[in-house]
């Protein structure tokens, strides 16, 4: 600061501690310039009381520490403004995604258990709004996904997708192929998650088609590369856990080993943890991935792996008993969260269905073991109880319930078999059943008696499939082929 001409510099009286005007420039250089506090960092870093670098869509600190990068809740009318104001690697492509974002946010906030997405890997789907606008292929894929969700209230939602949904699906496939052809986009999280979402949409698109384009093999290849590049990324780990056991069981071309072993030492998603403090213990704290990942190989080669079949079966029985105990202890609790019950049902369906199959193998190995017969009866009773209490989760949720019903139906007879057949009919118009129908059509080891259910299509051993033994099949009794052709590869 300079003193104007004609003016005298002010000198403070000695002893006051006030500097004169001649020393003000030097003092100004020593003073700290305060800036307004920024509140644009992620909530995870704020809770940890560390500085967030504000990288979008996931900050580097959360990536390094393998934490879920949680951000402020957004609504469709502020998404564009928020993305424009925060620092990011690049600006969003355009504002044309507002309508798709609003649809996605609507479905993410649906509280109806039958139509909500809270049981659809919520840690992955909740990140979609903040990731939109930076990848054209992801934006188109989300538009396809939301257009299919809009048809859920119509009749035969999983057998007759709309014309617009088909057009968007074709556009998404073309965009995915272009992204995979570009080396700088091939292994981006947005590209890989687009492939994962298209695999979910694929069930709607091709359940009754003569030729299907599968994505399981290509997605497995992308995930293997992703684990090498980003071994601690929680988003990448969530993708791996989302598709492991179920897809690999039915598709013999998908091999989980040896790359799946890299996940054994990494923290996996919790099996179940009560969201309310009033819920009764015990808690299922984490997935034991090792026995779960062995199930596909054990189902294909049981005799060569008798000891592993027994140990995996024991683990599944333990989980089923623990889940059943949690359900019985908390079903009358008024504060028990609905989504907690749905998560328990999902775990129960996956473990009970697999346990029924392994029980059948063990009864073949040990025909005089009466304990195994008793366990089969208990498991089938648990499957019936599971299907009855999960009725309210139809049509979008109730994951793994049809698989458990089909497995139990194959090993029972009499009135129990009739009850299981009726429950299979009750779950016919669900996403989980549509997914199972598609998988069975490409399952070489499928039990022959499944063809007694008219809407199932059996694998014929020639790369295709043949019809079931009923006149009310999806194509009116004509032959159909579900050849798996992966557009990713």
Image (cartoon, rainbow, N blue to C red):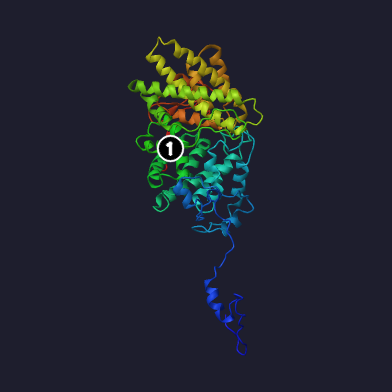
Q: Outermost residue, right direction?
A: 334
Q: Position of residue 252 (x, y in %)?
A: 38, 31
Where residue 238 appears, as percent x and y from the top left, is 47, 40
Left of 414 or right of it: where is 336? right
Which residue is depicted at the point 48% across and 31% down? 438
Q: Helix, strand or loop at disc 1?
A: helix
Taking 16 as reference, is 172 above or below it?
Answer: above
- Mark 1 Cα shell of 10 Å, populated few (<14), some (14-19), many (≥20): many
Relative to 150, does residue 438 appear above or below in the rendering?
A: above
Please name whichever residue, 56 or 412, is drawn nearer the observer in this view of the structure: 56
Q: How far across and down, in percent of the image, does residue 456 sit?
A: 50, 25
Q: Position of residue 306 (x, y in %)?
A: 35, 20
Q: In this rendering, does residue 15 appear at all? A: yes
Taking the image as shown, residue 260 lies to the left or right of residue 396, namely left
Asked if residue 212 can be seen in this view, the reply is: no
View extreme (front): residue: 15
User: Which residue is drawn at the image coordinates 36% and 38% (left, top)?
Assistant: 259
Quarter of the view holding residue 264? top left
Q: Which residue is mark 1?
A: 216
Number of numbered discs:
1
- Report the residue at 59% width, 80% height from top: 20
Res. 330 image quadrant:
top right
Report the residue that reaches farthest toward the bottom.
Answer: 6
Q: The N terminus is located in which quarter?
A: bottom right
């Amino acid at each position: 600061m300079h003193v104007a001409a004609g003016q005298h510099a002010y000198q403070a009286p000695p002893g006051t501690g006030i500097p004169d005007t001649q020393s003000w420039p030097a003092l100004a250089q020593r003073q700290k310039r305060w800036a307004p506090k920024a509140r644009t960092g992620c909530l995870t870093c704020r809770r940890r009381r560390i500085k967030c670098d504000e990288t979008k869509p996931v900050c580097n600190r959360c990536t390094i520490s393998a934490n879920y990068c949680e951000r402020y809740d957004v609504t469709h009318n502020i998404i564009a403004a928020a993305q424009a104001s925060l620092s990011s690697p690049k600006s969003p492509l355009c504002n044309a995604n507002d309508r798709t974002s609003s649809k996605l946010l609507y479905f993410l906030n649906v509280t109806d258990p039958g139509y909500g997405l809270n049981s659809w890997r919520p840690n992955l789907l909740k990140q979609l709004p903040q990731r939109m606008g930076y990848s054209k292929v992801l934006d188109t894929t989300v538009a396809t996904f939301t257009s299919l969700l809009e048809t859920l209230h119509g009749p035969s939602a999983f057998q007759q997708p709309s014309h617009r949904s088909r057009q968007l699906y074709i556009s998404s496939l073309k965009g995915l192929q272009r992204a995979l052809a570009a080396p700088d986009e091939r292994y981006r999280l947005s590209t890989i998650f687009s492939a994962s979402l298209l695999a979910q949409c694929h069930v709607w698109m091709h359940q009754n088609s003569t030729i299907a384009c599968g994505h399981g093999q290509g997605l497995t290849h992308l995930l293997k590369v992703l684990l090498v590049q980003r071994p601690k990324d929680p988003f990448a780990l969530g993708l791996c856990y989302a598709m492991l056991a179920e897809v690999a069981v039915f598709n013999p071309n998908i091999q989980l080993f040896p790359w799946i072993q890299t996940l054994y030492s990494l923290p996996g998603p919790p099996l179940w943890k009560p969201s309310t403090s009033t819920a009764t213990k015990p808690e299922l704290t984490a997935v034991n991935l090792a026995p779960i990942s062995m199930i596909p190989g054990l189902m294909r080669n049981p005799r060569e792996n008798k000891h592993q079949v027994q140990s995996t079966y024991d683990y599944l029985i333990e989980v089923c008993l623990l889940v059943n105990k949690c359900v019985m202890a908390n079903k009358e609790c008024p504060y028990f969260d609905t989504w907690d019950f749905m998560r328990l049902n999902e775990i129960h369906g996956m473990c009970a269905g697999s346990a029924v199959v392994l029980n059948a193998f063990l009864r073949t190995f040990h025909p005089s073991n009466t304990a195994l017969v008793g366990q089969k009866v208990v498991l089938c009773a648990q499957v019936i109880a599971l299907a009855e209490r999960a009725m309210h989760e139809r049509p979008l949720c109730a994951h793994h319930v049809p698989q458990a019903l089909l497995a139990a139906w194959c090993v029972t007879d009499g009135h129990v078999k009739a009850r299981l057949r009726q429950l299979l009919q009750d779950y016919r118009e669900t996403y989980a059943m549509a997914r199972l129908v598609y998988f069975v059509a490409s399952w070489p080891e499928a039990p022959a008696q499944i063809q007694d259910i008219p809407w199932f299509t059996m694998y014929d051993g020639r790369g295709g499939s043949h019809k079931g033994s009923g006149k009310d099949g999806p194509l009116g009794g004509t032959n159909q082929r579900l050849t798996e052709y992966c557009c990713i590869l």
